[in-house]
Amino acid sequence: MKPKKWIAVVLSIFATPLAFLYVGAPRWAVISFTISLALGLAGFLLPGQLAEGAAGILSLALIALWIWLAYRLAAAAPEQAIRPWYARWYGMLAMVAGVGIFVVLLRVFAYEPFKVPSSAMLPTLPVRSNVLVQKWGYGHYSTMGFSFGNGGISQPLERGDMIVFDWPRDPRQSFIKRLVGLPGDHIEYRDDKRLYVNGVDVRGKALPEYLDENQLVPLQRYRQRLDRIEHDYLVKEAAAWWMQQDAQLPPQCQVGATALSCTVPAASYFVMGDNRDNSLDSRYWGFVPAKSVIGKVVYIVPPRT
């Protein structure tokens, strides 16, 4: 049976690789899939409106090319009594299922993208940034709200790492914070907004002020070093930090008149946002259990403005 030209055209618009499988051109199916995958990755990884616009123009040009090519191949296809298995409906369905399973496995076990929803990690992560999270080695087998178990952490985390985790008070929500305390560490955050890790003041040099564009408030910017990782964080210098005396914190934390001090228990972490005065973090609800860690941020894509 000869492939129908109109079906080839429709498939080339909505599912290009399937169009080429339908007309019996598996090599073009692989080529179109590879190009589409590369464009998708470029759109995620490359920042800026220029990159987005270039990818959009290239995508439109490719769609026109795929339509023309699929139509030509369908028109030139010979009459066949038996079409190849991959050109039949069940073959194409199997291909779609295979790609879908591969994508799910990739997101569950290897890497998964997340979008930054708030300003809690300014200046490092602006609102609407995209981050790529490494999941292998952290045992949190989940994606898109579905959990497939937990295997424990095998890749060591370091102070200063940015991690994504299930919020202990509502695991349906995922948070992005900076890890500042490992198991056994003593963490102290004082009302002058200085952080002490095992008795060491980790505040570095002061930098020029940072203007929060959403609130139009100038914030003091500092550079901080945690082990091998150096990063900037923000504070409002005008007001002292104050901790509620009745905060529901674990027994390993004590709230004093001028400071909060915590000893991080085993298989747990203490996290904070880089935007110190606009972050709901361990200072307010306690520790992140190791089993809640989804993964570590390994790549940042700034928002397109």
Image (cartoon, rainbow, N blue to C red):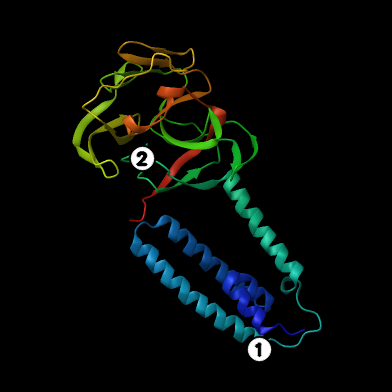
* Residue 11, percent from left and from top: 63, 74
* Residue 156, percent from left and from top: 49, 31
Give the mark count: 2
The image quadrant where one finds the C terminus is bottom left
- Dot 2, crowdedness within 10 Å: few (<14), some or many (≥20)? some
| Marks 2, 1: nearer the viewer | 2
Question: What is the secondary structure assignment of the residue under circle 1?
Answer: helix
Amino acid type for the residue under numbered disc 2: Ser
Residue 256 is drawn in which quadrant? top left
Seen at 19% across and 38% down, the residue is 209
Seen at 52% across and 66% down, the residue is 36
Residue 182 visible in the displayed image:
no
Seen at 28% across and 23% down, the residue is 193
Question: What is the secondary structure assignment of the residue under circle 2?
Answer: loop
* Residue 61, percent from left and from top: 46, 76
Please indicate whether residue 225 sits to the left or right of residue 143 in the image.
left
Residue 218 is drawn in which quadrant? top left
The residue identified by callout 2 is: 119
Q: Earlier in the sequence, mark 2 or mark 1?
A: 1
Q: As rendered, which of 287 and 296 lies closer to the eye?
A: 287
Residues tagged 2 and 1 counted as in contact (Cβ below 8 A): no
The image quadrant where one finds the N terminus is bottom right
Query: Which residue is farthest right?
Result: 81
What numbered label is drawn on residue 76?
A: 1
Please indicate whether residue 57 sits to the left or right of residue 205 in the image.
right
C-alpha span from label 2 to label 1: 56 Å
Seen at 67% across and 73% down, the residue is 21
Residue 284 is drawn in which quadrant? top left
Q: Is residue 84 positioned above or below 166 on the image?
A: below
